[in-house]
Image: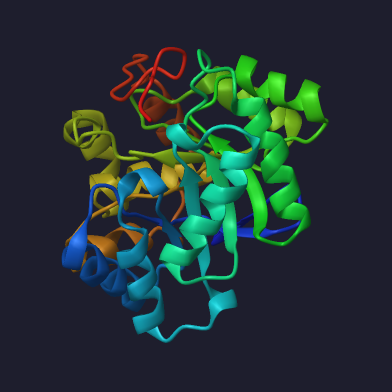
Amino acid sequence: METTRTFLLDDGKIVPAIGFGTWPLTGEEATRTVLRALEVGYRLIDTAARYENEREVGAALRASGLPRRDLFVTTKLRGSDHGYAATLRALDESLERLGLEDVDLFLIHWPLPRRRLYVDSWKAMIELREKGRARSIGVSNFEPEHLQTLIDATGVVPAVNQVELHPEFSQLALRAFHAARGIVTEAWRPLGKGSALREPLVEGIARKHARTPAQIVLRWEIELGVVAIPKTTSVDRMRENLAVFDFALDEDDRTRLASLDRGARQGGDPNVHEEL
């Protein structure tokens, strides 16, 4: 039985297999919820400049009393900060809000291909990694053509691509592209909007393993080699989402779960998404 709780990035860094997402938490609720997640046992905390909760996340990190290197903190570059100089400045501002000297992972949040600036941002992120301001660098919501453009322009492969991924949108082709290049896939909205959890197929596998549907889906993603970052404000569900390392799915389970893929994207299309 696989019981790994971490994955190895291509730059030699280690990332937890399960993290805690913070969108759309804001204000005191964000600090309180992230602190609870840390107390439950989460060590990967995912935020973004666009979420406007970096200060609150930073407050929770400090309140936890956990050593900095026990934490894996991710933030993301917002669209309005694309460009070389703007990216350098943006990470400084994110670090100030977080109250940190570095982040473990810095991602370009969306490619915004019509702006044609994501390569410039990537070059700045390479510099930030070299300076130790970002220990690892990657992207979010990038399609294969966007990833290949970065690689061709710089020779540097993103360590991570964080994308929408759940049973109804399993990103098979994108995951294959990642695997061929050593890119770790990370899933936002790993449980979808809950529709897959109500599928009789998922409910049946959950009964078979005496688990919840959410645990089945998260375990499936981990067995695919995908980092999952679910978000919940419920402490019970926080614990539930972490309790996926003491059982394994069988080949029939995996085949049946794969059959749920309908290409049902729930979020934005990276080729046209323009959020800044």
Which part of the image, by quadrant, shows the C terminus?
A: top left
Vertical position of residue 207 compared to residue 42: above or below: above
Among all residues in the image, which is located at the extreme right?
Answer: 155
Location of residue 204 (image quadrant): top left
Location of residue 36 (image quadrant): bottom left
Which residue is rendered at x = 56% and y = 40% of the image? 86
Image position, residue 166 (x, y; %): 36, 32
Q: How is the image coloured?
A: rainbow
Q: Is residue 91 visible?
A: yes
Which residue is rendered at x = 63% and y = 40% of the image? 85
Image position, residue 57 (x, y; %): 35, 65
Q: Is residue 256 left or right of residue 116?
A: left
Q: Is residue 131 left or right of residue 183?
A: right
Which part of the image, by quadrant, shows the N terminus?
A: bottom right
Vertical position of residue 255 compared to residue 248: above or below: above
Q: Is residue 246 visible?
A: no
Image position, residue 21 (x, y; %): 35, 52
Q: Could you say which is closer to the camera, residue 232 or residue 251?
A: 232
Q: Could you say which is closer to the camera, residue 226 or residue 148?
A: 148
Which residue is rendered at x = 55% and y = 53% of the image? 91
Which residue is rendered at x = 19% and y = 30% of the image? 195
Vertical position of residue 37 compared to residue 154: above or below: below
Q: Could you say which is closer to the camera, residue 55 or residue 197?
A: 55
Among all residues in the image, which is located at the extreme bottom?
Answer: 65
Q: Is residue 137 left or right of residue 140?
A: right
Q: How many marks?
A: 0
Image position, residue 169 (x, y; %): 38, 23
